[in-house]
Image (tube, helix red, strand yellow):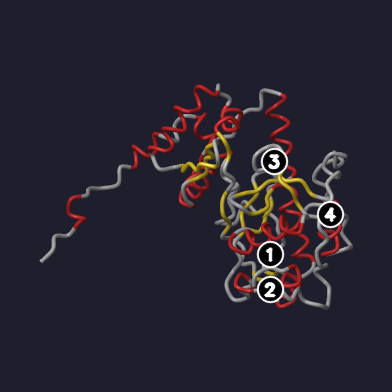
Amino acid sequence: MGSDPSLGRGDPDIARTASAFADPRRVRVLMALIDGRALPAGRLAEEAGVAASTISNHLATLLEHGLVIVEQQGRHRYYRLASVEVERVLEALAPLAPRMPITSLRQHTKAAALRNARTCYRHLAGHLGVHVFGQMIRAEWVTGGDGRHDPTIAGDRLSAPGTGAQYRLTDRGAEALSCWGIPVRVLDRERPLRYCVDWTEEAHHLAGPLGSAVTDRFFELGWIMRGNIPRSIRLTPSGESEIAAIHPDVDDGMGSDGQRESSEPMSSEDRSFGGVDGPRPNSPTPNKSIP
């Protein structure tokens, strides 16, 4: 009779793993990688605010604790988060952490870019994410809520996955998203949709498998592009017109409550990217390449 391998193991050493999160420079590295990209040590040093000679020590600590992995591409090494569990830890800690003050122009620029449009655990967030989800609600692609954050409802906490509303995809929404080329496997009309309460906009944005699939498809169609700041997103002209077409009665740039979220116009730099025109969601002809 073989021995039980679990008998030689004690409780998880949470304190040891948690120690890797205790240094703000290492946390900045992890946050720079949270959109799923692999980045070189030099870029991570910039994000962490340390010298190139110092970042290697922090990366070694993260590797030792199993929080990142490294990939060799030619002469260069690229780092990425080790697993989705690391993302979930950061997601769980975010609502508990106090907000840090902005003390420099660089921080202000970064904060403004992330508020405008960013990825949040691989789905769209910020003003753009809230606006897209609001458009879907107004077009009756999604029912079960109005997209607004309500602090009086349990499960509607800022910077956290939402559980207060019971959003569901409608038949109209499933048909429209299929025209975008969203995989059928994520167009579930029975289960509630996952959403997050956006911490900058104080409103809901789409999350979960459908949120990730929509974001991936936007990238594929050239409707959005990654910005220079990690996690930041730029909306292309074709993306702007397609998102506006979801519910044409609302001006592009409006939030889920119908009010303009920012008085700052989109810069010429943000509008300077061309995109690959994809099918309009209201097109009567479905995308034939849908899996």
The answer to whether 265 appears left or right of 148 in the picture is: right
| One can see residue 60 in this view | yes
> Relative to the observer, which residue lies in front, 265 or 221?
221
- Residue 278 lies in what quarter of the image? bottom right
3D distance between C-alphas at marks 3 and 4: 18 Å
Q: Label 3 amino acid? A: Leu
3D distance between C-alphas at marks 1 and 3: 25 Å
Camera-side mark, 2 or 1: 2
Q: Label 1 amino acid? A: Gly
What residue does disc 1 label? 145
3D distance between C-alphas at marks 3 and 2: 31 Å
Camera-side mark, 2 or 4: 2
Q: Label 2 amino acid? A: Ile
**Numbered circles on residues, count:** 4
Whether 16 is drawn above or below 280: the answer is above
3D distance between C-alphas at marks 2 and 4: 23 Å
- Disc nearer the start of the sequence (3/2): 3
Q: Which mark is residue 290?
A: 2
The answer to whether 20 appears left or right of 53 in the picture is: left
> Relative to the observer, which residue lies in front, 70 or 33?
70
> What is the quadrant of the C terminus in the image?
bottom right
Camera-side mark, 1 or 3: 3
Disc 1 + disc 4, Cβ < 8 Å: no
- Residue 170 lies in what quarter of the image? bottom right
- Disc nearer the start of the sequence (2/1): 1
